[in-house]
Amino acid sequence: PEFWKSVSEGPAVRRVSHSTVVQETMRTLFGELARPQDYVWVRPRPVGWSTGLHYDHPFFARGSRRVHTVWIPLGNIPVSNGPLVLVEQSHQFSDIIDSIHDNDQDSNDCPAMAQQAAFEGDWSGDTVAFLLQRRTRFLTADFQTGDVLVFGMDTLHGSLDNRSPNHLTRLSVDVRYQPFSHSVDDRYFGPNPTGASGQGYGDMNSCKPLTEIA
C-alpha cells in the first residue's frame, strides 16, 4: 500500500490527474473552481480482465452531489485493449438510480447492501440482454494519449475485456472532481485518505497481484 500510495500521489500521476488542463476543464463544467480529490486510482488491467458495470454513486454518496469522475488513459487504449464503456442514457434509468441513492458504500455502513446495488443489478448476468431490454447501447472509443472522459455519479459504466493482440496490460487513472464550494467527503481527502473501504490504498487493485484484481 505504501508503494502504491507513493505512485498515486507521486508527481508523474499528479501531473496527469491534477493537471492545469483538467482542472480548467472541470472549472468550465462546474462554473466555478474545481477541487480534485486527493485519493487517485491507478488501474492496471491485464489481458482477459474487465471491470463490471456499476454506478459510482454508492462509493461517493457523501459531500457533494456534483462529484464527477475523470477517467484518463495512460497511453493509447484501443477498443481491443478494454477501454471504459458508458451505457447510453443510463443517467435516466430512474428505477435503478433511485434504489442506489439509498445506499452509501462504507466498511462500517451496510457494505453488502451497497455492493449489491452497485454491482448486482439486472446487468450482472446477460449484459447484451440488459442493453436490448433497455433499448440502449455501449459507448466507447479508441482512446489516445491526451484524451479525458468525464461523467457523473449516475452514469452506468465499466470496461470491455482486455483482448490486446500484443498481450499488453492497459493502464488508466481516475480521479473525482467537485465544485470547490461544496462539502467534501473526508474519506478521499487529506494526507492519508481511507477510501470507501477504510483501507486506503491497500484496497486498490494496483496493490493486488494481476491474477486477483477485480
Image (tube, rainbow, N blue to C red):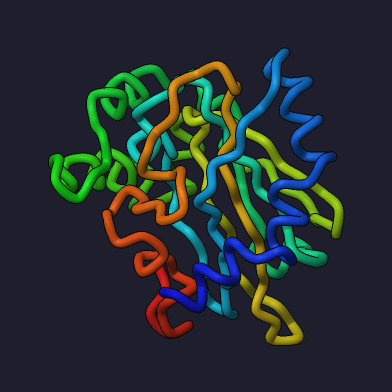
State the residue at coordinates (66%, 69%). Answer: 171
- Residue nearest the viewer, comparing 134 with 63: 63
Residue 118 location, x and y as percent?
33, 42
Above or below, comparing residue 167 to residue 188 in the picture: below
Whole-percent x, y for residue 47 in the image:
59, 80
Q: Is residue 193 left or right of residue 86?
A: left
Question: Residue reaching furthest front?
Answer: 191
Name the residue rendered at 47%, 28% in the picture.
154
- Residue 195: x and y in percent read 36, 51
- The one of 91 and 180 positioned closer to us in this rendering: 180
Q: Residue at the location (57% across, 32% down)?
A: 68
Left or right: where 73 falls relative to 126 = right
Q: Is residue 159 left or right of residue 115?
A: right
Residue sitting at x 26%, y 25%: 99
Q: Quadrant where the C terminus lies?
A: bottom left
Task: Please identify the quadrant where the N terminus is shown.
Answer: bottom left
Image quarter for residue 164?
Answer: bottom right
Res 106 seen here: yes
- Residue 161 in sight in this render: no
The quarter of the displayed image where residue 86 is located: top right
Q: Hey, which residue is sitting farthest top in the picture?
A: 31
- Total of numbered circles in the picture? 0
- Could you tell me residue 72's position as x and y percent? 71, 52
Q: Is residue 7 above or below residue 89?
A: below
- Relative to 167, residue 126 above or below: above
